[in-house]
């Protein structure tokens, strides 16, 4: 209140500034919340339509049915699940070992030059549109498998799964390499100091120490394989089929229709009953629950086995 | 694995350089170092058994263009504690890592000159660094147990060397020798990372001695520990010297004075200035620079 000191006025405040600051805050919050809002709405709508379906079709019949034929109003999930399971298992067999081996090479063995070539190469692999993988499976992989004498049909789960596997290699290798690179060098030194060879240090020290990250990469890659659509739509055929447990190898050479491919087909079919259409949401919800559970499992395992380093 | 590839391993072979070590003319001609090589003649308390087990001759190490060690001549006696002291960047750790060829892991590092372990030059082409490191264990500055159980940490070296018969017994013995057994015997399956820093470092010592090496190299093993843990480690080092040759790098001069039989003083530029009985170094060093360093006037 002193009138003696003519200084800058530190009490005046532009009108409306507080309101503007509040507004910025809420706009930013809205953007941050948008993805969650969208996810929640999708789940709610998916669940609502799935419930409509389950009021007309007994869930037990749905989850245990061995036949999926919309034209006859038979909705058994197991044939679709068979296709999804096959894709997941085969692509995992291809991608997990290859991805981890690539990650080991990049993290432990590659020179800087080599890494600067290989890493972008792997990232390009991750950037190829999946429909291209699908066409490639149909046009090149299947004929190749026939050339080497495998009795594959034109549409078969094996070549589709091979391409899905190749597609998810970069995911495994990139995340696993991050995990291995963050293993402290002091642990490698300890291994070498004990008279371990490079391979012993890698397999006995680095990989176990990075296990939680490697495992997370597996789960994410499997989720990706389960949800992969375009490749299987193009190359795996459109016939739902049950696994033939008496001749496991023969399964590989036949066409299957995984859950994702079935959803695409139902959605793009010309004439489909109302019930047939809502089955799409039941399948979608099931897919969502599977991948959601896998992600939960991944987080749980990562938290349990994560080693804290100083 | 290619164990025992080093040609001088078996005890039937005479160790020719042991004699030459004590009597060899010193190439650098530095009077201090000539004196220091005369290990047997010292009247030190523990000097009786001190035939040299590790010996360097005109050892030079470069990191790229930078020279980290300059013509080091040093003979480390068997079953004693030899301390390496000196200011930061003086090359003491570099020397330590030359002994078990850990410097091989650094691309830019280049070693010239000779370093003998039991009479065999470890930089000879036929020496397998993996086999060498199985006989020369190492303990690092920061405790670095593997993220495995306590048991698996100690068993690690035994397993990679296929010494898996009586492994439980060997693990127990190593933990006892490292003065850790009583604290961990009921929780061998617990993660090593749950131990305290001092316990982790003793576990690393147990891991190193489980495979029964000849030499244990320690790179400032107590610098990351509190005083109580440090004193346990120091007691342990003195005990270990009854069975092993111990070479310890430390920046703590009191520690060197307390636990070592011999002390090597490195000063800036990678130069070994004086190497002698620890008592002599701390009470009456020949070099004025060493005296200045010991008394805190320099470094």
Image: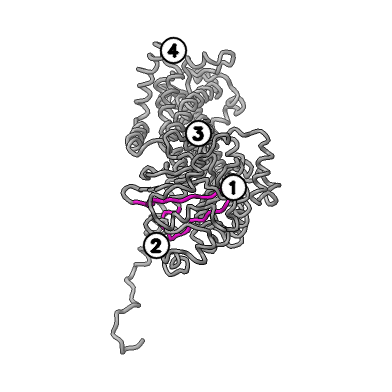
Q: Tell me the mark number nearer the camera, choosing from 3 and 1.
A: 3
Q: x and y percent of residue B170 in the render?
A: 66, 40
Residue A1 vertical placement versus B173 (above, below) = below
Q: Magenta region: which residues?
A: B67-92
Mark 3–mark 1 Cα distance, whole angstroms, equals: 21 Å
* Residue at the disc numbered 3: B7
Mark 1–mark 4 Cα distance, whole angstroms, equals: 69 Å
* For marks 2 and 4 on the same chain, the one whose residue lies earlier in the sequence: 2
Mark 3, Cα crowd under 10 Å, few <14 / some 14-19 / many 20+, is few
Q: Can the viewer see residue B26?
A: yes
SS label for mark 3: loop
Mark 3–mark 4 Cα distance, whole angstroms, equals: 62 Å
Classify residue A156 by image quadrant. top left
* Residue at the disc numbered 4: A153
* Residue at the disc numbered 2: A22
Q: Can the viewer see residue A171?
A: no
Mark 2, Cα crowd under 10 Å, few <14 / some 14-19 / many 20+, is few
Which of the two residues, B194 or A93, is positioned nearer the viewer here? B194
């Amino acid at each position: 209140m002193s009138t003696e000191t003519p200084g800058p006025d530190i009490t005046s405040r532009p009108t409306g500034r507080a309101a503007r600051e509040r507004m910025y805050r809420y706009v930013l919050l809205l953007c941050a919340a948008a993805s969650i809002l969208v996810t929640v709405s999708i789940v709610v709508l998916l669940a609502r339509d799935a419930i409509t379906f389950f009021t007309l079709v007994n869930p037990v019949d749905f989850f245990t049915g061995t036949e999926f034929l919309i034209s006859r109003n038979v909705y058994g999930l197991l044939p679709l699940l068979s296709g999804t399971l096959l894709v997941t298992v085969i692509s995992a067999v291809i991608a997990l070992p290859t991805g981890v081996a690539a990650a080991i090479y990049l993290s432990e063995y590659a020179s800087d030059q080599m890494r600067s070539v290989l890493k972008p190469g792997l990232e390009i692999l991750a950037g190829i549109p999946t429909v291209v993988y699908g066409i490639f499976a149909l046009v090149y992989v299947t004929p190749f498998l026939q050339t080497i004498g495998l009795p594959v049909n034109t549409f078969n789960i094996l070549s589709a799964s091979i391409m899905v596997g190749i597609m998810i290699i970069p995911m495994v290798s990139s995340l696993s390499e991050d995990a291995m690179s963050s293993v402290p060098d002091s642990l490698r030194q300890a291994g070498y100091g004990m008279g371990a060879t490079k391979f012993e240090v890698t397999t006995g020290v680095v990989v176990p120490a990075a296990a939680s990250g490697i495992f997370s990469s597996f789960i994410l890659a499997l989720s990706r394989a389960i949800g992969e659509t375009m490749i299987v739509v193009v190359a795996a055929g459109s016939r739902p089929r049950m696994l033939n447990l008496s001749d496991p190898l023969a399964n590989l050479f036949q066409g299957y229709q995984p859950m994702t491919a079935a959803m695409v087909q139902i959605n793009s079919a010309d004439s489909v009953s109302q019930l047939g259409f809502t089955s799409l949401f039941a399948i979608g919800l099931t897919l969502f629950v599977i991948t959601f559970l896998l992600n939960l499992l991944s987080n749980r395992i990562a938290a349990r086995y994560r080693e804290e380093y100083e | 694995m290619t164990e025992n590839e080093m040609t001088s391993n078996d005890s039937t072979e005479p160790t020719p350089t042991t004699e030459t070590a004590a009597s060899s003319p010193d190439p650098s001609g530095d009077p201090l170092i000539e004196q220091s090589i005369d290990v047997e003649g010292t009247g030190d308390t523990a000097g009786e058994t001190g035939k040299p087990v590790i010996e360097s001759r005109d050892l030079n190490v470069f990191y790229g263009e930078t020279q980290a060690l300059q013509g080091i001549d040093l003979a480390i006696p068997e079953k004693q504690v030899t301390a390496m002291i000196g200011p930061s960047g003086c090359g003491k750790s570099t020397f330590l890592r030359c002994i078990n060829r850990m410097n091989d892991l650094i691309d830019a590092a280049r070693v010239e000159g000779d370093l003998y372990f039991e009479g065999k030059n470890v930089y000879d082409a036929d020496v397998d660094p993996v086999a060498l490191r199985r006989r020369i264990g190492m303990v690092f500055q920061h405790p670095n147990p593997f993220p495995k159980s306590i048991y698996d940490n100690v068993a690690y070296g035994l397993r990679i060397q296929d010494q898996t018969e009586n492994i439980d017994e060997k693990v127990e013995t190593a933990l006892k020798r490292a003065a850790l057994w009583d604290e961990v015997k009921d929780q061998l399956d617990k993660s090593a990372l749950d131990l305290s820093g001092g316990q982790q470092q003793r576990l690393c010592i147990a891991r190193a001695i489980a495979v029964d090496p000849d030499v244990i190299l320690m790179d400032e093993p107590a610098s990351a520990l509190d005083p109580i843990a440090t004193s346990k480690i120091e007691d342990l080092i003195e005990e270990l010297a009854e069975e092993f040759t111990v070479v310890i790098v430390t920046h703590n001069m009191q520690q060197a004075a307390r636990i070592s039989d011999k002390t090597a003083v490195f000063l800036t530029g990678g130069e070994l200035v004086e190497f002698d009985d620890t008592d002599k170094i701390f009470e009456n060093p020949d070099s004025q620079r060493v005296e200045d360093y010991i008394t805190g006037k320099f470094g």
